[in-house]
Image (cartoon, helix red, strand yellow):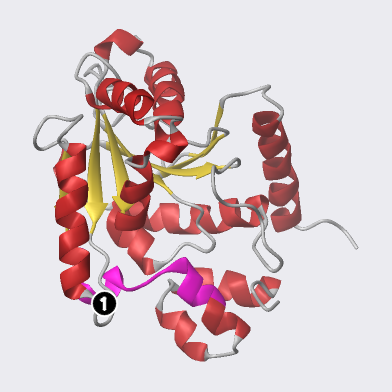
Amino acid sequence: MPATADDEQLAADEMLIKRVQSGASAFELVYRPSPSWPRSSPQSITGPPALAILDSSFNPPTRAHLALASAAGEAAGARLLLLSVRNADKALAPGDATYAQRLAMMRLIAEDADAAVGLVDAPTFVGKAGILREAYATLHGTKTSENPGLVFLLGLDTLERLLAHRYYGSPDAMHAALTRFFALDGDNASVVCARRLMAGDTIVSEEKEQNLIKTAEEVASPGRVSLVDIGDDLARYSSSEVRKHVKEDDQKWKILVTERIADYITRHGLYRV
């Protein structure tokens, strides 16, 4: 049976994944929404705009991902959906979409978000920031010294991991790494975090938010970490809920994802195990 266009794309993506995992490449741009991305046009001579990065496992992408990708608003002129093929916490579980399948779904949602799609092999945001600064400067044809800024779009649970010293070896090492991460003359990073509402724990969530912001302000200037609402319904959407409902053959999972993502999951029989 001849290979389909989807098969050929998966094979090409698997090669890019292996390049990144092997260390042959620190970053790979998998998809761009226009030939001139991240420039607004091929003739643009303006400096690089801030880059908004939505870094997630995309297993699968949900409507919440789509809303969060737009959360940076005018603060960022270019958007990137980023998949790390090495995560500090997570390994592939039975029934998970492969990395290549996730890239295929990320392309679908990237078209809706007017975003590019990229691959990186780094377990922490601090490690990713340096790689992305260099890659972004190369893509834009500018010097890293121009340092336009990186806006990381996170969920509350991910912000909690960013501020957890167990990923840095010690509290002092975390303080040093995050100080550089947020500093204007360092990685010039900021964080936009979506609130996550869970049934019955609104007060707990608010207390957690306040504690995280307080921790962040120990290493970052005020305003470097901000919280946004993406809507109560969307704030409850999660990839784990999608996987759970698919496995249980509960069709309500289809409202958590876009129509094209639902079609992809169904056609490829994902998350049934």
What type is the residue that disc 1 sits on? Asp
**For mark 1, does the 10 Å Cα neighbourhood hold few (<14), some (14 to 19), or many (20 or more) residues?**
few
In the image, residue 168 lies at what x, y percent?
Answer: 43, 31
- Residue drawn at x 53%, y 83% is 245
Q: In the shown orientation, is residue 31 left or right of residue 176?
A: right
- Residue drawn at x 36%, y 42% is 164
Q: Main secondary structure of the magenta part?
A: helix
Depicted 109 relative to depicted 78: above or below:
below
The image quarter containing residue 115 is top left
Q: Secondary structure at mark 1?
A: helix
- Confirm whether the magenta stretch covers residue 235: yes
Depicted 198 relative to depicted 180: above or below:
below
Depicted 105 relative to depicted 246: above or below:
above
Q: In the shown orientation, is residue 114 left or right of residue 169?
A: left
- Confirm whether the magenta stretch covers residue 181: no
The image quarter containing residue 187 is top left
Q: Which quadrant: the C terminus?
A: bottom right
- Residue drawn at x 32%, y 55% is 155
- Residue drawn at x 68%, y 78% is 272
In the image, residue 225 lies at what x, y percent?
Answer: 18, 41
Is 165 in front, or is 162? 165
Q: Which quadrant: the N terminus?
A: bottom right
The answer to whether any part of residue 238 appears in the image is yes
Residue interval drawn in magenta:
230-243
Q: In the shown orientation, is residue 94 left or right of residue 60?
A: right
Q: Which residue is mark 1?
A: 233
